[in-house]
Every structure is written in C-alpha cells, then in structure tokens.
Amino acid sequence: MIFDTHAHYDDEQFDADRGELLASMPENGVGLILDPGCDYESSRRAVELAERFPHVYAAVGWHPENCAPFVPEDLDALRALAKHPKVVAIGEIGLDYYWAENPPREFQQEVFRLQLALAEELDLPVIVHDRDAHADSLAIVREFPNVRGVFHCFSGSVETARELWKLGWYVGFDGPLTYKNAKKAAEVAAEAPADRILLETDSPYLAPVPLRGKRNDSRNLTHVAEKLAELRGTTAAEIAALTEANGRRLFRIP
Ligand code: NI
C-alpha cells in the first residue's frame, strides 16, 4: 500500500469532491494519508478529516508563508489541537525565503523555533518546509537535537541531505522528482539510505509527469514511486513497502 505522507486535502481545490475522493483512496492502493496544516484553520480542518476517515491522519502547524498573523497565544491553540489522538506531527513548519512578500526571515525563524519547541514538549515529529533556506533550516533543527522529522519535498544538495541523515532525519520525494530539471533531487534519491525516504504528493500541488500542471492527488504517487525505483535500481512495489514502513516508524502509526 502507498502512504502519502503530505497531502493538503483541507485545501479549497478539493471542495467539490473531497469526501468521495478520500473515501476511494484505499481501493486505489493508497492506504494512509497525512494531511499537514498551514495555519490554525487549515490544521483544524485537517483534524476534522482525520476524525472522518480512518486512513487519514493530521499534522498541525503554521507554514512559514502563512505565519504573518502568528502571535504567542496561537501556540496554546496549536498545543490543544496537537493533543488529538490522530495528530501525529507538528507541521508544516519551516522557512521560505523564495517569495519576497513572505514574512521577514527573523520572524519566520522565531515561529519555526517556537513550533520545534512545541514538538519537543509533546514528543511529536515535525514536517519541515525549506525553500531556498537550506543553511538556516539545518542550523535551526540542530538546535533541537531531541526532535526528528522530515524535510518535505527536499530540494537541497546531497551534502545537506547527508547531514540530515546523520541527525536521523528523513527526506520526502514528490512530483518534482519526475521533472526534467530534477538533477539534485535525483542525486539525493539515488544516495538516500533506504530507511530515510518518504513518498508524498503535496496535493493539490506538484503533480508528477505526465500530469504536471493538473490538480494532484495521492493516486498519482505511483509515478513518483516508479521514478524513485528507477533511480535506486528497485521496483515501485518495493518503494511503496519501504516508504510505508518508514512513514509508520517516523509518525508512530501502528
Ligand atoms: Ni505542503
């Protein structure tokens, strides 16, 4: 079975068919889905989906692009939400230096640190978004040696990935691995230790080739699994089994 460890089914792009689509996932080979929140409201919606569907789990957190309105009291609301039995991680959290209109870097770093501290306090793993902020993201997670997690849609160098693996962290692969310009990701995918890789869609975004540009959903992970298998000299079925076991271990899903 496939475990999609990162899919935003709380997104409005699924408003028309969310229920039927999620209900159909197990019969399409997708047996587990983790929906990470991007602010309080989307985290709350992710938890609602996890309550509704046995194969859906939630993560709660403030995404760096959305963290501008964050105030310290928001951490208490997040803590309360994180105690729900189907919340298995804090995420997605991190740093995004790509968009000029994003909150100031120092503020993103502050919100990131507060949420890493919350993960440590609650003994939960984290889902990290790192875009054009590899050095700062790595430096900040190093400040929290008791926290583990995944760098989702990993876009850094193989050298950065090696540092993460040494720290016991995971890297996630999505649609961009199938894109023609994915040289760095392909290198990371080929070298990654078997017990450190996860499959994820980032639905509704990042649809893999040959569906690039369309709305993405977890069924399309077969394309990413095939690409990973090709790069690692194995089969898509083995990649599915391996990444399911890795996801269950990291997120402690029996
Ligand atoms: Ni995401």
Image (cartoon, rainbow, N blue to C red):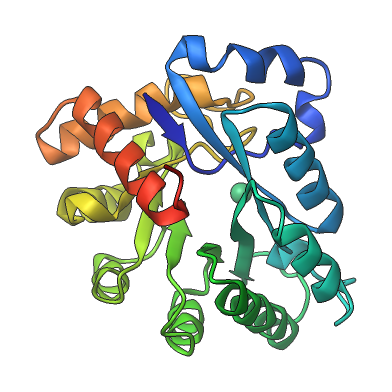
Q: Most extreme residue toward the left, as rendered?
A: 233
Q: Is residue 187 visible?
A: yes
- Say whether residue 101 is visible: no
Place residue 127 in its image quadrant: bottom right
Task: Check the image and report above or below for 220 versus 40.
Answer: above
Q: Is residue 87 above or below residue 55?
A: below
At which x and y percent is residue 76?
83, 74
Query: What residue is at 79 percent from the left and 58 percent from the top?
Result: 39
> With 39 as the anchor, is 147 left or right in this view?
left
Relative to the observer, which residue lies in front, 85 or 18?
85
Q: Tell me which residue sits at (52%, 30%) in the image.
A: 207
Number of numbered discs:
0
Q: Quadrant of the C terminus?
A: top left
Give the quarter of the figure containing the N terminus.
Answer: top left
Q: Could you tell me residue 84's position as x and y percent?
A: 71, 53
Q: Residue at x 36, y 31 (%)?
A: 224
Please tell me which residue lies in front, 147 or 196.
147
Looking at the image, residue 171 sits to the left or right of residue 102; the answer is: left
Left/right of residue 159 with respect to residue 253 in the rendered view: left
Image quadrant assignment for residue 7:
top right
Q: Is residue 29 above or below residue 150?
A: above
Q: How far across and how far down the image is residue 69, in percent? A: 90, 71
* x 39%, y 36%: residue: 179
